[in-house]
Structures are given as C-alpha cells and as structure tokens.
Amino acid sequence: MRAEAEMGSGPQPTGRALRLLQVASFASSFDRLAIAVMLVVIANELDSSVHAVSQAAAAYFLCYGIAQVCWAAASDRLGRVRTMRLALLLSAFGGFVSAAAPDTTWLLVARGFTGACFAAAIPSALVYIGDTVPVRVRQAPLTDLMTSTAAGMAVATVAAGAIAEFTSWRVAFALTAAIAAVLSVAMRGLTEPPMAARSRIGGSLRIVLTDRWAVLVLVLTLVEGCVLLGPLTFLPAILQANGLDVTMSGALTALYGLAVLVFARLVKRRSRRTAPARLILIGGTLTALCYVLLTATQAVLPVVAGTVLLGAGWAFMHSTMQTWATDVAPGARAMAVSLFATMLFCGSAVAAAIAGPLVDADRFQLVFALALATTVPLVVVATIGRRRYPPRQA
C-alpha cells in the first residue's frame, strides 16, 4: 500500500479535476500578486507609505508560508479535496475583509489571514497530482499547474492595476474572494486520493527533516523565494517611479506572467529530454542576467526586459525544484510539499521586508545587487545538488 501511494498510482485525475486545480492556482496567484501593482494607490488612499503597505504583502507571504504545516496536517486528516474546499471558503472571507479594510493595520491583518488560507490551494493541488500521477510523467501536469499560476500573475498585474485606477483597489480583493467562494462549491465532486499510508504530523516531519536531500531542497527553496519572488513585488512601483501610471506599469509587469506561460511550454516539451540539473542551471542563469541588467539601470526598458528574464528563470528553475520536492520524501509527500511552499514564501517575505525600506528610499540598485549576490550561489549549489541526486522512483 505504501509503495502504491509513493508511486502516485491513486485514481488518475480527470480533465475537470485538473482544470479546477488550475483555476484554484490561478486565483491564488492572482490574489497574491494583485497588491504589488496597487502599492502606491493603496498607500495614497490610506494616507500611508509604500513601505507600510508593502508590509501587508510581506505578511501575506509570511502567513502563506507558516500555514503550510497546518494545512499539511489537515490534508492528511481530512483529505486533499476537503482541505482545499475549506481553505478556499476561508480565503473568500479574508478577501472580503481585505476589501473593507479602513487602514493599513486592518489591511495587514486581513492580508495575513487571507495568505494563510490561500496557502492550501497550490500545495494541495501539487500533492493531489503527486498522489495520482506517476513521477515519470508528473512534470507535465505540474508545469500546467505552474502555467495557471503564471496566468494568474499576468492577469493580476494588468487587471488589478486597471481596476484600482478606474474603480477601486478594494474591488480587486473582492473579486478573488468571490472566485474562491465559487471554487469551494465547485470542488465538492472531486475524487479523494486514498488516505492509506499517510503519517501523523510528527512522523511526517521526522521523515522530511531526517532526509538530507529533503533538507537540501528546503534550504534551496528558501533562497529561491528571496530571489525569484521578493524583488518581483516592487517592479510595478519602480516603473511608477519612472513616471508610468498604475495601468501601464501593471500591463508591463504582466510580461512576467506571459514569459512564464511561454517558457513553461518549452520546459514541458524539454523535461523528458533535458536533465533536471540543466533546467535549473538555465533558469538560474536567466535570473542572474535579469539582476545584472537591473543592477546596472532601472530605466523602463531594462526593467521590462528584466521582468521577462525573471519570468523565464521562474519557468525553468522553479518547475524543476517543484518536481524535485514531490520526489524527495514520498512517504511524507504532503509535508514535504507544504514545507517547500513554507520555505518559498518565507524567503519571499524576508526579501520583501528587506527591500521595502530600500524601495521607499529609491535605492533600487542595492535591491537588485543583493538579489544578484544571492542568486549566484543558489544556482551553483542547486545545479550540483540536483545532478548528484539519486532517483528514488521509476
């Protein structure tokens, strides 16, 4: 029974199930990134600073990460689908509270709560696929899931910017809340993977934290969150500092999501013929090139080019790290993937907290120089580690 669960040989997900998982991933990423393009607008309306509002984004990332272990425990006890439905319902509540926030304090609390609830959406979808799809063909549906995530990011920066400029930033938060509520109902027909061979939370943690490869992946993912997600939060604000309006800065930042969409398709085609270590190296190199460019200049065209490079880097590197995370501890997959997400978004929260005051002080060059200095060792260690990793499943 344990071997069956480890091989991902549960009931194969239907096309409808995969589409619902993709929509949930879309909604989660839309909600997570929408605030980036609206930082200046929210700060002006609430009579606050960009740094203060960015703390709401940091709180979202931090709570998103910290909540992962709790959702992993819930997933093993309640089931993957029930956990996703509960999380989406709570996300809807948090989103509507965010839309009604009267000041930055309420916004910080509401966004933190919403992040903690949306935390179950993408990781539970990853685990669901891990439970039901064999590892030899798993990167394809995982890449499709990442594509939906990227689409959410792309649409968020365009739609949230336009919504904030022509109606209100509150409408953007209410929109994702409504989508989450609908999804919670729509997912009630999904088939649960088998519950056998799932450990208690203590046992799952022990399996993951005593596995040296799992620990390596988690440490690398923490750093990955710093370099691939942290600076992304501030790209629209940097474009707005160049004189662009909210809608235009959002439209240009949407090139990040479009780049992920395009390059994710390339990764999907190459994943069976290209070694994972090489995919990580390609993605890391593209990310480093992004930060070399943005350290040199923060004019509009270089920022746009850097946005595309960062999206390409995410497509190559993160999808490969994500697939690696589903394989390192198959006996505790839910916990491993949840800790993976914890590290990713804790890293993002750390980077956002460090970069926020620097962005307020217009020290953009230092932000990107720090990102570059962090990217290089990450790529080297991740590439070597993945090359030496012994395959555990057929």
Image: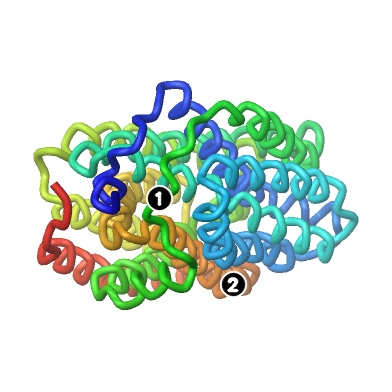
Residue 341 vs residue 138: left or right? right
Q: How many marks?
A: 2
Color encoding of the figure:
rainbow
Residue bearing mark 2: 353
Residue bearing mark 1: 196
Residue 303 seen in the current view: yes
Residue 112 vs residue 65: left or right? right
As drawn, the residue found furthest toward the right would be 102
Residue 349 vs residue 113: left or right? left
Label 2 residue SS: helix
Q: x, y (%) of residue 99?
A: 81, 45
- In the image, 15 versus 264, the foreground residue is 15
Q: x, y (%) of residue 179?
A: 67, 32
- Name the residue at 81% across, 33% down: 167
- In the image, 348 versus 87, the foreground residue is 87
Q: Amino acid at mark 1?
A: Ala
Q: Is residue 22 above or below residue 131?
A: above
Q: x, y (%) of residue 159?
A: 64, 33
- Name the residue at 49% across, 47% down: 124
Q: Is residue 207 above or below residue 192?
A: below
As drawn, the residue found furthest toward the top would be 15
Q: Residues within 10 Å of mark 2 (few under 14, many from 20)?
A: some
Residue 297 seen in the current view: no
- Name the residue at 40% across, 50% down: 196
Q: Is residue 18 above or below residue 214?
A: above
Q: x, y (%) of residue 369?
A: 39, 71
Q: CA distance from mark 2 to mark 1?
A: 41 Å
Q: Amino acid at mark 2?
A: Ala
